[in-house]
Image: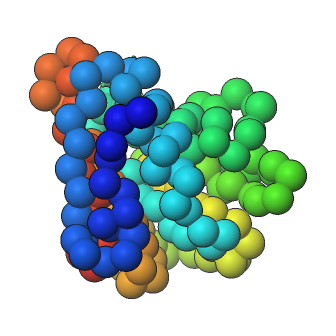
Amino acid sequence: MKEYNFELFLIGITNQIEYVSNSLIDTLNYSYEFAKYLKKTDIVVLNGELGSGKTIFVKGIAKYFGVEDEVSSPTFTIVNEYITNNINIYHFDVYRLDNEKQFMNTIGTEYFENGISIIEWGNIIKNILPKDTIYIDISKIDDNTRNILIRRNV
Ligand SMILES: Nc1ncnc2c1ncn2[C@@H]1O[C@H](COP(=O)(O)OP(=O)(O)O)[C@@H](O)[C@H]1O
Ligand SMILES: [Mg+2]
């Protein structure tokens, strides 16, 4: 199995890790491994242009937790819930929201206390997210290559 160095991030030796993914499958495997380190109420933000692979990253996390539902961007509903045996996963896509205020008026932060929240385009609501939120930036290098940067304390 590939070494991804998530441990260094987990125990705080480093506050960022970077990975170059060469394919969709590569990203799926990477996020599947990343998911092993998530705790019950962690919040993960995914930023990156349309088609960069944010939803693919969520698919890998969902797969790790045994989600059987189809995972797709909840662009119109803003949030999808995937209920698994031992954990709730809330998959947000806040692309259509303008700001934090709109998020508070329509969705609210209650979800954050009840499961793992993964937020596509999360920078839009950055000001209401807790300090320990994990930020993931995905950027396109070419058709099949993506740079994945995972950070905290940003
Ligand atoms: N290395 C890669 N990682 C993730 N997706 C990739 C990669 N290379 C190509 N792709 C393609 O990029 C697209 C990513 O789509 P998606 O995850 O829905 O993007 P987003 O949610 O960021 O808009 C998919 O069509 C996928 O096949
Ligand atoms: Mg998406």
Residue 32 visible to an observer of this rendering = yes
Q: Position of residue 19 (x, y in %)?
A: 23, 42
**In the picture, residue 27 is in which quadrant?**
top left
Q: Residue furthest left?
A: 141
Report the front residue among 111 and 94. Answer: 111
How did the renderer colour the structure? rainbow
Q: Is residue 60 above or below residue 34?
A: above
Q: Position of residue 42 (x, y in %)?
A: 55, 70
Which residue is drawn at the image coordinates 14% and 20% (left, top)? 142
Report the front residue among 113 and 123. Answer: 113
Which residue is drawn at the image coordinates 39% and 70% (left, top)? 10
Residue 103 visible to an observer of this rendering = no
Which residue is drawn at the image coordinates 24% and 17% (left, top)? 144
Q: Is residue 146 left or right of residue 136?
A: left
Q: Residue furthest right?
A: 85
Q: Is residue 123 above or below residue 72?
A: below
Report the front residue among 73 and 84. Answer: 84
Which residue is drawn at the image coordinates 46% and 31% (left, top)? 28
Report the front residue among 100 and 22. Answer: 22
Q: Position of residue 35 (x, y in %)?
A: 54, 51
Q: For the C terminus, which image quadrant?
A: bottom left
